Amino acid sequence: MNTINPERRHLLKIVFAGSAVTFAFTTGLATPVRLLADDWPRRTFEATGEAEILNTLFGHTNSRATDAVRIEAPTQSNGAVVSVKVVADLIAVEAIAVVTRNNPQPLNTFVSLSGAAGFYTCRIRVYHTSPITAYVKAGGKLYSTSALIKINTSGDGMRF
Amino acid sequence: MTTLTKVTARANGEHTEVLVLVRHPMATGHHADAVSGNRIAAHYIETMTFRLNGHVVAEAYLGPGVASNPVTSILIPRTRPGDQVKVEWTDNQGQRGNGETVVE
C-alpha cells in the first residue's frame, strides 16, 4: 500500500471501507478494484447503463430510496446547463454520484468526500427528458433519490 | 485560450460552501465546428481536488456530462475564519488550473 499516492487514499476509502469490503466478500459481490488502476475512472464514465456505473463505483447495485437525500433541480430546463444540488442528511457520507438515466453515458459526475459534508452541486448536461438520480454512499450503505427533469427540445434532444 | 478558475468561500455559521467556477469548454468530442466542419476534440475536466488547510476534503470527478464553464460546490463543516481553501483541477489534455481563497 506504500506505493499509493496519499492524495488518492480517500478514494480508496470508498472502495475498501472496512465493513463494506467484508460485506461484499461474504455476499459474493465484486469489489470495484479496477477503479484504482486509473485516476479518472474512464470505464465508469463511458458506461452506458446505470448498473455498470454502480458496480464499478460501489461494487453492487443495491440502493435504498430515501427522503434523507434531496435533489434540488429545475423541473424543466435547457439541457445544456442543468443546475443540480444534492443534499444528504445522513452521517458519514463518503460519496455522491449524479446519474442521468437517459443520457448516452449516464454518469455526469461524482464526488468522494473526506471531510466535506453530504452536499454537492454541479451543472450537468441532460440530453433528453430523464430522471436524475443522486446515489449517496453513507456509513457503508448506498442510498438514492430521483427527480424528473423535462428538457425543452424536440426530436433527437440536445446535441453536445 | 485563457482559463480562469474562481474559488469563492461563502461562510454560513460554522459551515462554508466552496464554490468553483472554471472557464472551460468541457467538449464531449462528439461535436463538429459549425464553420469548418472539423470535429472538436474531447476536452473536459476530469478531477477537481478541494483542500482545507492543505488536507483533501473532497475530490470531484467530472466528465463530458458536465456543462461547459462548470460550476461546482461542496460544503465544509466546522470552518474557522482564516482557513485556507485551495482547489486544483486537471483535464484530459493534461492542462491544470487552481484557485484559492480564505474563509472570512
Image (cartoon, grey):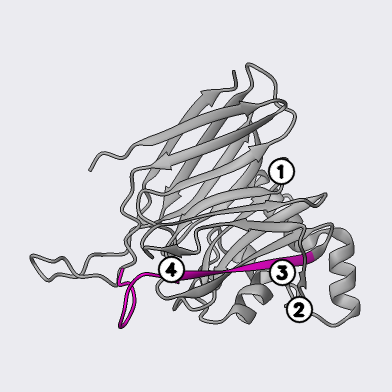
Identify which amino acid the numbered label 4 is placed on: Val
Q: How far apart are marks 4 and 3 (CA)?
A: 23 Å
The residue pinned by badge 4 equals A126
SS for tag 2?
A: loop
The amino acid sitting under disc 1 is Ala
Give how far apart the Cα atoms at labels 2 and 1 are. Answer: 28 Å
Q: Nearer the viewer, mark 4 or mark 3?
A: 4
Q: Give the range drawn in magenta.
A: A142-160
| Other residues around mark 1 within 10 Å, as few (<14) / some (14–19) / many (≥20) | many
Q: Kindly identify the amino acid type of the residue bearing the numbered disc 3.
A: Phe
Do discs 2 and 1 share a chain?
yes
| Earlier residue among tags 3 and 1 | 3
Real-space Cα distance between discs 4 and 2? 30 Å
Check disc 3: other Cα within 10 Å, few if <14, some if 14-19, many if 20+.
many
**Residue B53 in sight here:** no
Image marks 2 and 1: residues in contact by CB distance under 8 Å: no
Which of the numbered marks, if any, corresponds to residue A81? Answer: none
Image x and y of residue B97, in percent: 41, 39
Is A7 situated left or right of B93 in this image? right
**Which of disc 3 and disc 2 is earlier in sequence?**
2
Q: Where is residue A58 in the image (x, y as percent from the top left)?
A: 71, 69
- Residue assigned mark 3: A58
Same chain under badges 1 and 4? The reply is yes
Tell me if residue A1 is in the magenta stretch.
no
SS at mark 3 in the image: helix
Gap in Å between the C-alphas at discs 2 and 3? 9 Å
Q: What residue type is labelled 2?
A: Ala
Q: Name the residue under label 2.
A: A30
Placement of the N terminus of chain B among the 4 image quadrants: top left
